[in-house]
Amino acid sequence: MSAVQSVDNVALLPAYLAAGTALLVLLTDLLFARPRATLAVAAVGAVATAVGAGLVAAGGERRTFCVAGDCSFVFGDRAGLVAAVFALLTLGVLGLSGGHLRAGRAPTGEYAFLLACSMTGGVVLGAAGDLITLIVALETLTLPLYVLVGLRRGSLASAEAAVTFFVVSVVATTVSLLGAALLYAVGGTLHLGRLGVLLGERPELHDLPLTAAAVALLVVGLAFKVAAVPFHAWAPATYDGAPLPVAAYLSTASKLGGVVALLAVVGTALPADRTGPVLALLAVLTMTVGNLVALRQRRTVRLLAWSSVAQAGYILAPLGALALAAGRTGEARAGAYAAAVAYAVFFVLLELAAFAGVTALRPADADGGALDDLRGAARRRPWIGAGLALALIGLAGLPPGLAGLFAKVTVVRALLDGGAAWLALVVAVNAVIGLAYYLRVAASLYAPLTPEAAPVSVPGAPAAAARTVAVVLAVATVAALVVGFAPQILLDLAAR
């Protein structure tokens, strides 16, 4: 057998485009030192990456870096969807960053370069076919975020958030690598498909203490990335200390990366009878704790952070059906995986819109402020307030936010198909709890103004930056509405 592997450069095109974007951003900043040119290159590169991912996925599944039928890079419809979402999220966050960068609190070149590097990790992550590629891609996605969180000059809160995020992520990565090493000791391979076949054909391996330890460590390590309870403590402090655009990226792209990685190992490699009960417990704890703590929040970003913890519970919930025999049938498993991916995509669209709305209503380069600062904001800026209210209503799962409504219906349907009616009931109860704080914030946007109310904007703020943020909010809102009216398209892509 030849030791030289054939390389399918077409399959790798989205990764080339993302990595090339990072390189071009660095060169543009070095040679021209013009912030607008640097941001333009980053934006064009993100669009090219999304288009490239769509074109490659449309041509059918492609594999490369293969040995004896096992491939380390598999680019199909689901990988194309994930890559396009990461690229578009990067584009959206660049649009939100204008005020932050114009304030001079962060260098434009380094900021755009780090975002492009993180995008590269996300693009590769969706196509990872073995544990090494998966973990390296996840760290490529996460590593630039440590710097982005702490890149704001003169901010002690950002520095503290960066250190917290770094320490927790290093521990999570170490735990994940140890789990991967133990899994290699059990199966003698790191390819996800081969591990799944091996553990499926030899059920006696499930009872080995080494297998149990490997599964537990790998799931726990990835649960940190998703901010699942009880591995969530880093998220609220990190989001609140980071600049608003970076917090938006953390809450969307970073969480999506953790979900994609967890789905890859649970759906392909790990035994469902071992991971199902763990994921069911994590889902119940995550959605319940996230919603209950969010009820007491008075700062905007902390409320969004805790609500994103709860949303992670809804994303994990369909995988909890694997705890039951009815949930481990082929059709039920496929439905659970599709529901988790679809919910994650619905969530990141609505979450990006929510952060865009908060960014538009706050002074340039300010933090998220308190919830009281948003009181009556929709009366002063009706269109921005309406976009933020629609995003919050969508996250709550109410019409006219059809994306959020269909997302929750999809999760409940997958749980019922898998025989996990009790878990569907927990999801429904938590969705009702979530209504309390989402609707409270949405209602406060239209509350009567008081004389002592804080202003929602700063006179003289750069008009171009404000317009860009408004465009991001409009596009994210329209995208959420479109997928809300045609959710089956997203489900079909997620199921492939």
Image: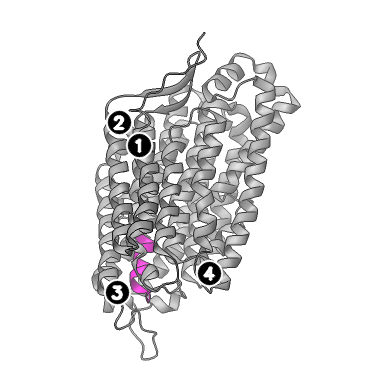
**Residue type at numbered disc 4:** Gln
Residue contact at pointers 1 and 2, CB within 8 angstroms: yes
Q: What distance separates the C-alpha of mark 4 from that of mark 1?
A: 40 Å
From the viewer's perspective, tell me whether residue 455 is left or right of residue 71: left
Q: Residue at x 45, y 71 (%)?
A: 105
Q: Residue at x 54, y 64 (%)?
A: 150
Disc sitting over residue 56 in the figure: 2
Q: Nearer the viewer, mark 3 or mark 2?
A: 2
Q: What distance separates the C-alpha of mark 2 from that of mark 4?
A: 44 Å
Q: What distance separates the C-alpha of mark 1 from that of mark 2?
A: 8 Å
Earlier residue among tags 4 and 3:
4
Q: What distance separates the C-alpha of mark 4 from that of mark 3?
A: 21 Å
Residue contact at pointers 2 and 4, CB within 8 angstroms: no
Q: Which element is circle 3 on?
A: helix
Disc sitting over residue 297 in the figure: 4
Residue contact at pointers 4 and 3, CB within 8 angstroms: no
Picture quadrant of residue 181: top right
Residue contact at pointers 3 and 1, CB within 8 angstroms: no
| Closest to the observer, 239 or 41 | 41
Q: Position of residue 118 (x, y in %)?
A: 45, 48
Q: Nearer the viewer, mark 3 or mark 1?
A: 1
Earlier residue among tags 4 and 1:
1
Q: Which range is magenta?
A: 353-364
Q: Which part of the image, by quadrant, shows the C terminus?
A: top left
- Residue at mark 3: 378
Q: Which element is circle 4 on?
A: loop
- Residue at mark 1: 14
**Most frequent secondary structure within the magenta stretch:** helix
Q: Position of residue 160 (x, y in %)?
A: 61, 66
